[in-house]
Amino acid sequence: MWRIARWVLVVLWLVAAGAAWWGAPRVTGNERALSDIAAHRVVAYDFGSRWRDESPDRWFAVPDLVSDASNPAIFAWRTSDGRAHWTDVSDVRGFQEQLRGMAYHSTNVLVLSTLINGIGLLFTLIFLAVLWAGPAPVTATRWYWWWLFALVPFGLGLLYWAFREVPWERPEIPAERLGGWRGLGLAFVTSVVISLVLLGLTWLFGNNAFPDLLTP
């Protein structure tokens, strides 16, 4: 049963990862915005002043576009393929006039956010229920796994837990297991390494391949 559940979690994680990467807002130029508007490729758009990401770093980022001023400088839009883009239009005069006559206006630029957050919530409920209400973990303590779940980005700590533990079996608990302090240290180091790797990949391949707003 748990072997099947493991692979179901992997498939769901791949769906969330793909949706987060595909729908992550990518910064582009004003020319691209005007081109998409003129070609009627824009199906949803919104204005704001800055991006805010309140999602926990342990999961994929789903930023919100918020407005703190009467004249927002960021124009974000979604094209028919589900991809989101944004650009700074503070220096473009009469930009909003370009939007007159458009058939669609929606603030739901990140249309895949519900799917990503829903899978993240499901992962959290499964992990917490099994970790704290199920049998004691075999390879490490509950606090060890808690820190890996809470601090390692993108749900990777949860995937590692799913393939290291067998929650529904009740083998003999060894006298020595990996403890909470080791889990905290490992989670911290892993989080830093993942962030540095993503920064390096963004520098090598550009924002289009590895969007800044996807980085924890």
Image: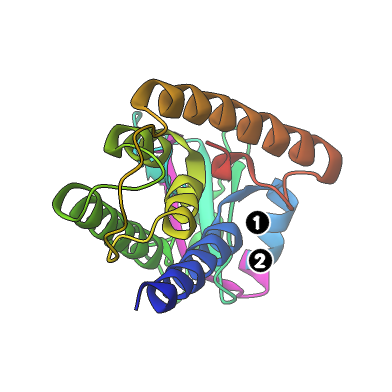
Position of residue 203 relative to residue 29, above or below, is above
* Mark 2 residue crowding within 10 angstroms, few (<14) / some (14–19) / many (20+): some
- Whether label 2 touches label 1, CB < 8 Å: yes
| Colour mapping | rainbow
Work out whether residue 198 or residue 172 is closer to the camera in this orientation and state it. 172
Above or below, 155 relative to 50: below
In this rendering, would 137 be left or right of 71? left
Does the magenta portion include 125? no
Residue 131, x across and y down, in percent: 25, 49
The region drawn magenta spans: 37-53
State the residue position of label 2.
36
| Residue at 62% from the left image edge and 32% from the top image edge | 195
Residue visible at 57% across and 32% down? 190
Q: Which mark is residue 33?
A: 1
Quarter occupied by the N terminus: bottom left
| Label 1 environment density (alpha carbons within 10 Å; few <14, some 14–19, many ≥20) | many
